[in-house]
């Protein structure tokens, strides 16, 4: 079956540092990947759509200069949280959509970020 | 507005049936998903409805009425492992998913 991995699974960092999270589709190509954020006891909120070879599109209210997205290949998208602050602590989840199939997204296991 | 509403929590006993309702008002509709999410884990796919009617898959069934903006997920023969959050999500344009807040299902012995 389709597998999506995320690395790291959890990270603790100091305020002001940058953190990079990787999302990989292991056995399929994904032209499009999505990045979500989930705060405790809340639902997933879409942050941005990552498109291979082009700029990401961000949802309203998401700062593109703070959350840098790079989708350099058909199997890898990265999210970098720049100058992280405690309020950025959250569960970050990516999903990948197989190329040519618009109905399906496969979710990664998530990355828990704690900013001290 | 853009709303997806589902109950916050439901409790049921092992072996019982539970129905989780979801109503939506969104600009753009290209299908409705149900996901299961255990605490601290990513969502796992349960069902996808794009046409009106009932889709049955084992112990789980999902229903959609597009004219009413309504869906439900039916869980039969509840097991303890079914205790989780169940997320209703509408697929909008460009494959984007808009999620409801989730319904926490608690299964008791």
Image (cartoon, coloured by chain):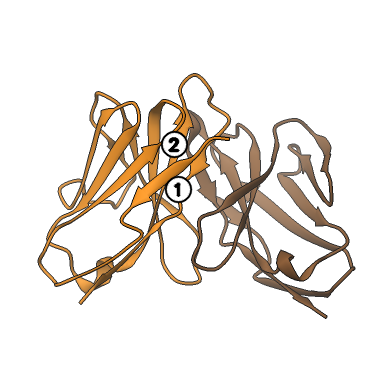
Chain colours: A orange, B brown
The quarter of the displayed image where residue B18 is located: bottom right
Q: Between A29 and A91, which is closer to the camera in this rendering?
A: A29
Q: Chain of mark 2?
A: A
Q: Quadrant of the C terminus of chain B?
A: bottom right
Q: Position of residue A73 (x, y in %)?
A: 28, 27
Of callouts 1 and 2, the N-terminal one = 2
Q: Is residue B100 above or below residue A2?
A: below
Q: Is residue B107 above or below residue A60?
A: below
Q: Which mark, residue B63?
A: none
Inter-mark Cα distance, 1 to 2: 8 Å
Check disc 2 and report its element: helix, strand or loop. strand
On the rendered structure, is A21 left or right of A36?
A: left
Check disc 1 and report its element: helix, strand or loop. loop
Labels 1, 2: one chain: yes
Q: Which residue is mark 1?
A: A108
Q: Chain of mark 1?
A: A
Q: Are marks 1 and 2 in contact (CB under 8 Å)?
A: yes
At label 1, counting other C-alpha atoms closer than 10 Å, the crowd grade (few under 14, some 14-19, many 20 or more) is many
Q: Between A19 and B32, which is closer to the camera in this rendering?
A: A19
Q: Position of residue B107 (x, y in %)?
A: 77, 74
At label 2, counting other C-alpha atoms closer than 10 Å, the crowd grade (few under 14, some 14-19, many 20 or more) is many
On the rendered structure, is A100 left or right of A61?
A: right
Q: Which mark, residue A96?
A: 2
- For image coordinates 36% across by 39% down, the residue present is A24
Q: Residue furthest top?
A: A100
């Amino acid at each position: 079956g389709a597998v999506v991995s995320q690395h790291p699974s959890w990270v603790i960092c100091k305020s002001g540092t940058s953190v990079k999270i990787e999302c990989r589709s292991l056995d399929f190509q994904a032209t499009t990947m999505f990045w979500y954020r989930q705060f405790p006891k809340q639902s997933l909120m879409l942050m941005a759509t990552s498109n291979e070879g082009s700029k990401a599109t961000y949802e309203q209210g998401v700062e593109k200069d703070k959350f840098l997205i790079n989708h350099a290949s058909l199997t890898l998208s990265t999210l970098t949280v720049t100058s992280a602050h405690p309020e950025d602590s959250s569960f970050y989840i990516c999903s990948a959509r197989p190329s040519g199939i618009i109905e399906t997204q496969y979710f990664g296991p998530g990355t828990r970020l704690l900013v001290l | 507005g853009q709303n997806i509403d589902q109950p916050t929590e439901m409790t049921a006993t092992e072996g019982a049936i539970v129905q989780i309702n979801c109503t939506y008002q969104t600009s753009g509709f290209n299908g409705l998903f149900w996901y299961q999410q255990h605490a601290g884990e990513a969502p796992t796919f349960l069902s996808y409805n794009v046409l009106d009617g009932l889709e049955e898959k084992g112990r789980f069934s999902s229903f959609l009425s597009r004219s009413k903006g309504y869906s439900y997920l039916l869980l039969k023969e509840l097991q303890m492992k079914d205790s989780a959050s169940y997320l209703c999500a509408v697929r909008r344009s460009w494959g984007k998913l808009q999620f409801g807040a989730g319904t926490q299902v608690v299964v008791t012995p």
